[in-house]
Image (tube, rainbow, N blue to C red):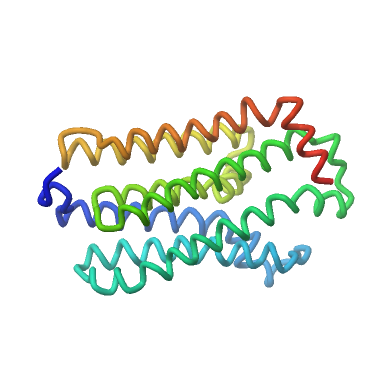
Amino acid sequence: MNVSSAIERPDSRVFFAVMSAGLLAIVLLGFGRSLYLRPFLDLPALPPAVWFHGSILTAWYVGAFAQSALVASGRTDLHRRLGWWVAAIGASVIVVGTTVTFAFVGRRDALGTDIEARIRFFSDIVWGDLAAIVAFIVFLGLALAWRKRPDLHKRLMILGSLALLEPALFRIWGWNMFAGVDRNWAALVVLVVAVALLALHDLSTRRKVLAVTLLGGVLLVGSRMLALFVIAPSGSGLAFIRALL
């Protein structure tokens, strides 16, 4: 690919900024009650690790949006200076997210939850979160490796943010207005729609779907389906959940 083909058009920069803003909005809505407004509501206190996890995850989405907004406004110099700080936040998301995921079942057991009675529910959450973390590691690593390729870097950053979106979506689909909605399938639909938007943007700006969009979408959606519908209900998957107690 020649240099000119790797340069994003101004309208493309705006697209990624708007998409990053939308993902940030979903996170703010999803965690509004359970995290940001929690001190003002009559809800049980959260362990410090969970608070930190929520704060780091929020910082990732804020940072990703800020970076895309800087590019859209032409401040690529500041974008480059802040890039490694956002990468450090991403690394923190991986470490803290993995720690909280492994501790999740034990923490709920300590609170008196009958884990065995709802073991499939907890298996879905744990394996879904682990799949998200693995996908995020791949997308973040490739985004850093190809940071000098804006056409690839922008798409990988969006895919990385999408990989971590399920917990926020899970909470939104739990609102009363969505009673009866299967939250796992609803979250998958959102991911598919988001990847489709990336593909449509590719078609409108490049007249083809870029390989990073296609393969990234397959990894994003495929890993989640594998985790939820193959690993989570399997004997080995359930045994792993019991081992976390």
Query: Which of the pair 59/173 is nearer the observer?
Result: 59
**Horizontal and vertical percent for residue 164?**
52, 49
Left or right position of 136 against 18: right
Quarter holding residue 37:
bottom right
Residue 238 point in image, percent of width and height: 76, 32
In the figure, is residue 40 to the left or right of 14?
right
Number of numbered labels in the structure image: 0
Give the camera-side residue of 173 and 88.
88
Q: Residue at x 28, y 74 (%)?
A: 78
Nearer to us in this view, 72 or 1:
1
- Residue 105 to residue 14: above or below: above
Please give left or right for residue 4 compared with residue 63 in the image.
left
The answer to which of 240 and 62 lies nearer the viewer is 240
Location of residue 180 by image quarter: top right
| On-image quarter of the N terminus | top left
Q: Name the residue furthest front.
A: 145
The spot of residue 228 in percent (x, y) is 62, 31
Going 82% across and 38% down the picture, which residue do you hit?
242
Name the residue located 70 percent from the left edge and 65 percent from the top edge: 49
* Position in image of residue 108 (x %, y %): 81, 51
